[in-house]
């Protein structure tokens, strides 16, 4: 739909827009109003170059498209009936809690093993553990490939699937070869299109899911969903959207918690949503409230940093990780709230 700057276009201007849309196999249908005329584009209007050329014209205010730019991720796509499974949990049916360390310490693997058992005991159905870490400070601990063995050993000991972040092709290959079931794309790589493409290609035909974090710099919903489209485009639709807070942070919180985008995502896409309250608020004491808010907003799951002894953790754990005891109580409440929402989708409160 072309909206002109003035109330209607001159015949010469109509000739210019008609010539452009014709190149892309479309035609123009004017919709004449008493005051204003707008110009519908009839045909597949999703050609980015066509829209850019039209929006570049001095007499065009803007071009609105009715068709979704994400053909596969759209709520109306054929994939809408697809259900993503993680371990034994089908997302949407049961609340999935994924919990564990921010960063595995290769010198102290027992922290990971003990945490893995404890979060399973608390009710988590998947583990998280950072092997390679995207650190803002280049001198901070960057993770260690040896932690991959520890991660997989934790998975074997508990029987739970594991999630870990990959940032490049080499890490992607190592993680897949080791049998990691959930690949995490971090907030810093959320719009790294060549990495998203590599992941999409690498997981095609494999029983692997991707936890795609939202870009940290207040990206639009369209940007977030389009990033997922890059992955599913290669054939594996097991993608999960993960709001994790945006920058600038809310005074007192590490990031600006964004669990409230969950219903907006669900109006636009079929993809399940797992919220990360840990990075959203950045402090253990605030994590349970943010997690419950996420479930109230309709999240299908939670990704939470937990540690048996947070003060002995690496990376974010000393500040953000909750203990297994706090996690156990949180999971009980979150599951009750999830059940309440499923029985009454408009329910928004916990009690
Ligand atoms: C993490 O999960 O530990 C992490 C670094 O997350 P994010 O990419 O959201 O900052
Ligand atoms: Mn972390």
Image (cartoon, rainbow, N blue to C red):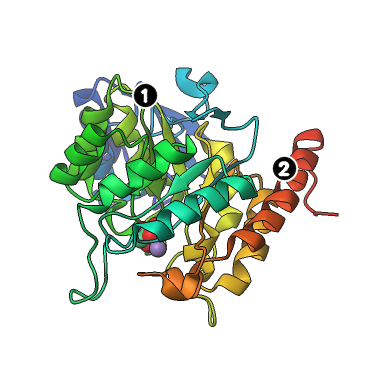
Quick one: 58 or 283, which is closer to the camera?
A: 283
Q: Residue at x 46, y 33 (%)?
A: 66
Q: How many marks?
A: 2
- Seen in the picture, residue 5 relative to 160 is either above or below; the reply is below
Whether disc 1's CB lies below 8 Å from ligand 1 is answered no
Q: Which residue is mark 2?
A: 338
Residue 14 in sight = yes
Which one is nearer the viewer's eye here, 34 or 341?
Answer: 341
* Rendered image quadrant of residue 266: top right
- x and y, in percent, of residue 103 in the image: 35, 61
Q: Which residue is mark 1?
A: 207
Q: Secondary structure at mark 1?
A: loop
At x 44% / y 65%, what residue is drawn?
246
Query: In the rendered image, which quarter contains the N terminus?
Result: top left
User: Residue at horizontal 66%, vertical 49%?
Assistant: 295
In three-dimensional space, the C-alpha distance between marks 2 and 1, rounded to whole angstroms, equals 26 Å
Left-right relation of 243 to 206:
right
The earlier-in-sequence mark between 2 and 1 is 1
Q: Is residue 63 visible to the viewer in this orientation of the structure?
A: no
Q: Position of residue 31 (x, y in %)?
A: 49, 31
Residue 244 — which label?
A: none
């Amino acid at each position: 739909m072309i909206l002109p700057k003035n109330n209607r276009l001159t015949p010469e201007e109509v000739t210019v827009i008609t010539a452009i849309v014709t190149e892309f196999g479309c035609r123009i249908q004017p919709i004449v109003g008493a005051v204003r005329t707008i110009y519908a584009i009839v045909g597949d209007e999703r050609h980015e170059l066509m829209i850019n050329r039209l929006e570049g014209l001095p007499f065009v205010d803007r071009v609105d498209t009715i068709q979704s730019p994400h053909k596969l991720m759209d709520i109306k796509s054929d994939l809408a009936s697809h259900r993503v499974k993680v371990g034994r949990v089908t997302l949407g049916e049961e609340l999935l809690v994924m919990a564990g360390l921010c960063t595995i310490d290769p010198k102290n693997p027992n922290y990971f093993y003990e945490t893995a058992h404890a979060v399973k005991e608390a009710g988590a159905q998947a583990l998280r553990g950072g092997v390679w870490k995207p650190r803002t400070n280049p001198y901070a601990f960057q993770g260690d490939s040896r932690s991959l063995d520890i991660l997989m050993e934790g998975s074997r000991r508990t029987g739970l699937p594991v999630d870990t972040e990959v940032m490049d092709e080499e890490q992607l290959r190592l993680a897949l070869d080791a049998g990691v079931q959930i690949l995490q794309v971090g907030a810093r790589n959320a719009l790294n299109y060549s990495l998203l493409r590599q992941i999409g290609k690498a997981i095609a035909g494999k029983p692997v899911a991707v936890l795609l974090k939202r870009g940290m710099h207040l990206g639009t919903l369209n940007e977030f969903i389009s990033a997922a489209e890059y992955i599913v485009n290669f054939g594996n639709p097991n993608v999960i959207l993960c709001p994790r807070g945006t920058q600038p942070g809310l005074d007192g919180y590490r990031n600006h918690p964004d669990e409230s985008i969950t219903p907006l995502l669900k109006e636009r896409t079929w993809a399940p949503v797992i919220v990360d309250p840990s990075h959203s608020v950045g402090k253990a004491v605030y994590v349970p409230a943010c997690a419950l808010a996420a479930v109230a907003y309709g999240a299908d799951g939670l990704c939470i940093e937990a540690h048996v002894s947070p003060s002995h953790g690496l990376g974010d754990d000393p500040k953000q990780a909750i203990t297994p005891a706090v996690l156990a109580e949180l999971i009980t409440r979150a599951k009750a709230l999830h059940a309440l929402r499923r029985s009454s989708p408009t329910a928004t409160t916990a009690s």
